C-alpha cells in the first residue's frame, strides 16, 4: 500500500473541538494541542543532570536484579529489554511525579483524578536493531468511539542521546491511526510503513529532559551502533477507568505511602504492602518479544 490518500484514510481523525479544559491557560491549551496533535510534547531541562545520574544508577541496579528472574526483564527486540520497578526503587520518584509539569500535563489530558499506574525502563544495548513500527497497546474503545486519549507515557533519558545510540523515532499525528490490518491491533503491516517513514522524527533528548506522549502514537526504536546503552525511564499515567493498572504490579510499602504528600497519594491506585515483591511482568509486546524487530 503506497497511495497517500489511502494511507491518510487510516486515521479516525482527532476530536473537533479539542478537549481543552474550561478556563485553560496558554500552557494547558498548548499541552492539549500537542498531545492531540503530534502525539508528543517535551520539556527541556526539567530535572538536573544529577537527578539523571542517580536515575541511571537505580536503573542499572534494578536491571541486574531483574535479569536472572523469570519475566523480570522482558525482551523488546534484539538487545532490548524492558523492566518494571516499584516507586521505592527510584530515589527521585517523588520529585518526578510531583513535578509541576508532570502534574499539569497529566491533569490537562487525563483529568484531575489521573492515576499513576506504571514505572519502568527500556534499555537498548549496543547492537540493538530497528524495531518494527508499533504502538504500545491496542487502541481503547474510548479512543475509537469518542477520540479520547486515556493514558500518557512520560519518558526521561539517562544519557545524552546521540545518533549512534539508536534514538527513539516517532511518527507525529498517528495516535488516531487504526486499521483491521494492524497485527494484534498494534503493528502496521510493512505495506503501510511509508506513512510512518514519511513522518518520522528522531528524538535526541539530553539528561534532565522529559517528554510526554500518547503510547498510541506509532513509533519504534532504531538501530544502535554505539558502545553505550541508552536507558529510558517510563512513567505510565491513566485516566480513571482506562484499566492499564491491571497489566502492572506496582506497589508501595505503608511507610513510603505515609511519607508522601496527599496530593500524590490520591493519584496512586496500587496496593500498599508490608514488603515489596519483585515484579513479574504481565504486559509484553508480543511482536517485539518474538524477535520480529
Image (cartoon, rainbow, N blue to C red):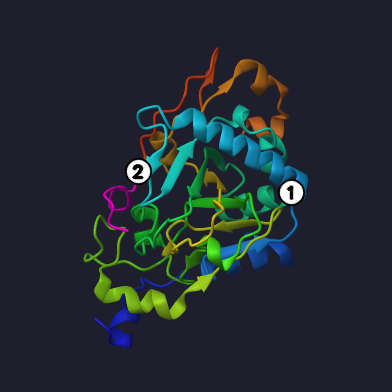
Q: Which quadrant holds the C terminus?
A: bottom left
* SS for dot 1: helix
Q: Give the residue at x 50% y 62%.
A: 166
In the displayed structure image, the side of residue 184 where residue 12 appears, left or right: right
Residue found at the far top of this picture: 274
Image height of 201 relative to 77, above or below: below
In the displayed structure image, the side of residue 126 where residue 211 appears, left or right: right
Residue 170 part of the magenta-drawn span: no
Tell me the residue that label 2 is attached to.
284
Residue found at the far front of this picture: 227
Q: Give the residue at x 58% y 52%.
A: 155
Residue 62 screen position, x and y as percent: 54, 32
Query: Start and end of the magenta stretch?
Result: 284-293
Tell me the residue that label 1 is attached to.
100
Mark 1 crowdedness (10 Å alpha carbons): few <14, some 14-19, many ≥20: few
- Nearest the eye: 113 or 75: 75
The numbered mark at residue 149 is: none
Image height of 5 relative to 248, above or below: below
- Nearest the eye: 231 or 14: 231
Q: Give the residue at x 66% y 21%.
A: 256
Q: Between disc 2 and disc 1, whose residue precedes? A: 1
Residue 146 screen position, x and y as percent: 40, 61
Residue 204 screen position, x and y as percent: 61, 65
Majority secondary structure in the magenta region: loop
Q: Give the residue at x 59% y 69%.
A: 33
Residue 132 screen position, x and y as percent: 34, 63
Residue 98 shows in the view: no
In the displayed structure image, the side of residue 82 where residue 49 appears, left or right: right
How many numbered marks does the figure carry? 2
Mark 2 crowdedness (10 Å alpha carbons): few <14, some 14-19, many ≥20: some
Amino acid at each position: 500500500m503506497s497511495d497517500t490518500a489511502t494511507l491518510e484514510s487510516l486515521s479516525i481523525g482527532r476530536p473537533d473541538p479539542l478537549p481543552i479544559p474550561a478556563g485553560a491557560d496558554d500552557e494547558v491549551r498548548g499541552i492539549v494541542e500537542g498531545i492531540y496533535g503530534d502525539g508528543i510534547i517535551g520539556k527541556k531541562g526539567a530535572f538536573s543532570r544529577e537527578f539523571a545520574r542517580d536515575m541511571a544508577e537505580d536503573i542499572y541496579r534494578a536491571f541486574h536484579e531483574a535479569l536472572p528472574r523469570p519475566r523480570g526483564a522482558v525482551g523488546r527486540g534484539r538487545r532490548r529489554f524492558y523492566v518494571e520497578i516499584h516507586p521505592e526503587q527510584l530515589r527521585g520518584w517523588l520529585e518526578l511525579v510531583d513535578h509541576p509539569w508532570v502534574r499539569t500535563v497529566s491533569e490537562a489530558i487525563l483529568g484531575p483524578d489521573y492515576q499513576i499506574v506504571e514505572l519502568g525502563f527500556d534499555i537498548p544495548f549496543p547492537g540493538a536493531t530497528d524495531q518494527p513500527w508499533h504502538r504500545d497497546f491496542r487502541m481503547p474503545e474510548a479512543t475509537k468511539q469518542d477520540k479520547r486519549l486515556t493514558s500518557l507515557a512520560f519518558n526521561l533519558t539517562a544519557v545524552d542521546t546521540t545518533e549512534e545510540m539508536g534514538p527513539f523515532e516517532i511518527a507525529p499525528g498517528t495516535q488516531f491511526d487504526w486499521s483491521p490490518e494492524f497485527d494484534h491491533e498494534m503493528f502496521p503491516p510493512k505495506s503501510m510503513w511509508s506513512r510512518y517513514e514519511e513522518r518520522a522524527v528522531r528524538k535526541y533528548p539530553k539528561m534532565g529532559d522529559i517528554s510526554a506522549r500518547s503510547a498510541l502514537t506509532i513509533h519504534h526504536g532504531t538501530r544502535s551502533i554505539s558502545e553505550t546503552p541508552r536507558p529510558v525511564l517510563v512513567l505510565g499515567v491513566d485516566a480513571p477507568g482506562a484499566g492499564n493498572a491491571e497489566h502492572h504490579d506496582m506497589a508501595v510499602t505503608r511507610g513510603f505511602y505515609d511519607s508522601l504528600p496527599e496530593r500524590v497519594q490520591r493519584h496512586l491506585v496500587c496496593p500498599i504492602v508490608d514488603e515489596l515483591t519483585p515484579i513479574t511482568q504481565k504486559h509484553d509486546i508480543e511482536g517485539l518479544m518474538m524477535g520480529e524487530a
